[in-house]
Amino acid sequence: MLVDPADGSVLTGVADGRVLRLRPEDGAVGVVAETGGRPLGLEWLPDGRLLVCDARRGLLAADPDDGAVEVLATEADGRPVGLCNNAAVASDGTTWVSDSSTRFGLDHVQADLLEHSGSGRLIRRDPHGAVEVVAEGLQFPNGVALAVDESRVIVAESGKYALSTCRPDPGAQEPAPLLTNLPGVPDNIATGDDGLVWVALAGPRNPAADRLAPLPGILRRLVWALPQSMRPPPPSQVWVLAVDPVSGRVVHDLQGTHPEFGVTTGVREHDGMVWLGSIQGTTVACFPVPADAGHGPAPPAAQPSTDADGDT
């Protein structure tokens, strides 16, 4: 999910491969591009194109004027990008991208989380197109954000219930913890206009999954092999945090419910409005940041339709 600062429209990827533009003032929906895969995270590139993390095709660039799509990267350090998820872009065009799993694709996300395989990577692509892995062994790295001063890269590790940080430098490194033991599963993250890192929580922690974590891999594999009908779905809940990117302090903890929206997997704060997306729904949502926001419930969300599953 992404907001166009030029006109306030909202861009989101959907399940059929399209990138859509939603105009909140009249509810109009237009197609920006078609990737032929599954677009997830979106960001702006310095040349005005959209950076698209496509879970099936890799890292792409899409021209919002004519819809032309260019493949930027499909592998890093000689290994294919397994699940290109989210990204952050520096002012010079350097891009950091989460490759959530090198073992499982988009259709088997739960398998990676339950196996706790730690096969995720953070990838860096420089402005000249060189691609390298800067961190690996991550527990399903998902959202990626860049501090306003570009001094650090923040990564949400869904399988670790944590936010980690890396230096923006090239070369392999060990991520440092920023915020650990989160109460829910962090998904997409984004730096807002307010300088805070906004975190979409896809749902509360699953006690059963926590108990599985220390068990041998073969037992965890038996659980994810169960039919979907035997696995409880995540609760329908609007839940986002806003975090100080330096101290890791939680500034806002906003929770609520809405009959037409839940399982928050995408978030973007722009000009005092928080926009939400869900990979399991057909709508996007928004609400203004409460003037006295802190730890408390979010107001009811509003939903312009996307007519397909939103991004994550």
Image: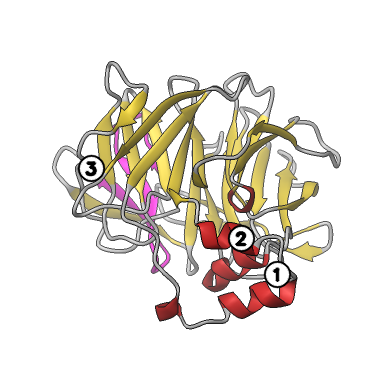
- Which mark, by number, is residue 23? 3
Q: Residue at x 20, y 54 (%)?
A: 260
Mark 1 vs mark 2, foreground winner is 2
What's the CA distance linking mark 3 and mark 1? Answer: 38 Å
Decide if residue 56 is in sight here: no
* Residue 167 in the image: above or below residue 104: above
Q: Residue at x 42, y 46 (%)?
A: 266
Q: Amino acid at mark 1?
A: Arg
136 left or right of 36 in image: right
Q: Residues within 10 Å of mark 2 (few under 14, many from 20)?
A: few
Q: Position of residue 16 (x, y in %)?
A: 39, 69
Nearest the eye: 33 or 244: 244
What's the CA distance linking mark 1 and mark 2? Answer: 22 Å
Of the image marks 3 and 1, the number of the one nearer the N terminus: 3
Q: Amino acid at mark 2?
A: Arg
What's the CA distance linking mark 2 and mark 3? Answer: 44 Å
Residue behind mark 1: 103
Q: Position of residue 66 (x, y in %)?
A: 41, 53
SS class, disc 3:
strand
- Asked if the stretch drawn in magenta spans residue 235, the answer is no
Mark 3 vs mark 1, foreground winner is 1
Residue behind mark 2: 211
Figure quadrant of the N terminus: top left
SS class, disc 2:
helix
